[in-house]
Image: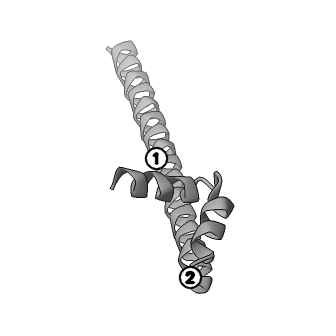
């Protein structure tokens, strides 16, 4: 299993996958299909994870900025009220 996982990782990162594919295709001529499908699916998943991380980070930053603006607004209102008293 460790060799299999390493081979899948190599294909996912596109590091040396043509050599692996050629070796397998020497026995099974149709073997290019699973290689291409795996590469496309793994790239899609990795891209989706990166997009999810970016969205999460942007949402967090936006929420923090909104909280900061609310705090500043509250402090301004308190200062105005104190000035009236």
Residue 82 lies, with reference to residue 25, above or below; the image says: above
26 sits left or right of 50 in the view: right
Q: Nearer the viewer, residue 24 or 4?
A: 24
Q: Which of marks 1 and 2 precedes in the sequence?
A: 2
Question: For the residues carrying marks 2 and 1, which lies nearer the camera in this image?
Answer: 2
- Residue 52 is situated, as x and y percent measured from the top left of the image, at 47, 54
Q: Label 2's element?
A: loop
- Residue 37 is situated, as x and y percent measured from the top left of the image, at 55, 76
Task: State how far apart marks 2 and 1 are (Cα).
Answer: 48 Å
34 sits left or right of 21 in the view: left
Label of residue 59 in the image: 1
Q: Going 51% across and 64% down the picture, which residue do you hit? A: 42
24 sits left or right of 77 in the view: right
Q: Going 57% across and 78% down the picture, which residue do you hit? A: 27
Residue 14 in view (yes/no): yes
Q: Which of 13 and 80 is in front in this view?
A: 13
Label of residue 85 in the image: none
Residue 52 in view (yes/no): no
Q: Label 1's element?
A: helix
Q: Going 68% across and 63% down the picture, which residue do you hit? A: 18
- Residue 13 is situated, as x and y percent measured from the top left of the image, at 59, 53
Quadrant placement of the N terminus? bottom left
Quadrant placement of the C terminus? top left
**Residue carrying label 2:** 28
Q: Going 65% across and 54% down the picture, which residue do you hit? A: 16
- Corner quadrant of residue 76: top left
């Amino acid at each position: 299993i460790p060799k299999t996982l390493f081979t899948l990782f190599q294909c996912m990162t596109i590091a040396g996958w043509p050599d692996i594919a050629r070796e397998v295709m020497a026995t099974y001529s149709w073997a290019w299909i699973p290689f291409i499908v795996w590469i496309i699916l793994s790239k899609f998943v990795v891209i989706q994870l990166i997009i999810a991380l970016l969205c999460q980070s942007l949402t967090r930053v936006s929420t923090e900025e909104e909280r900061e603006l609310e705090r500043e607004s509250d402090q301004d209102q308190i200062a105005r009220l104190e000035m009236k008293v």
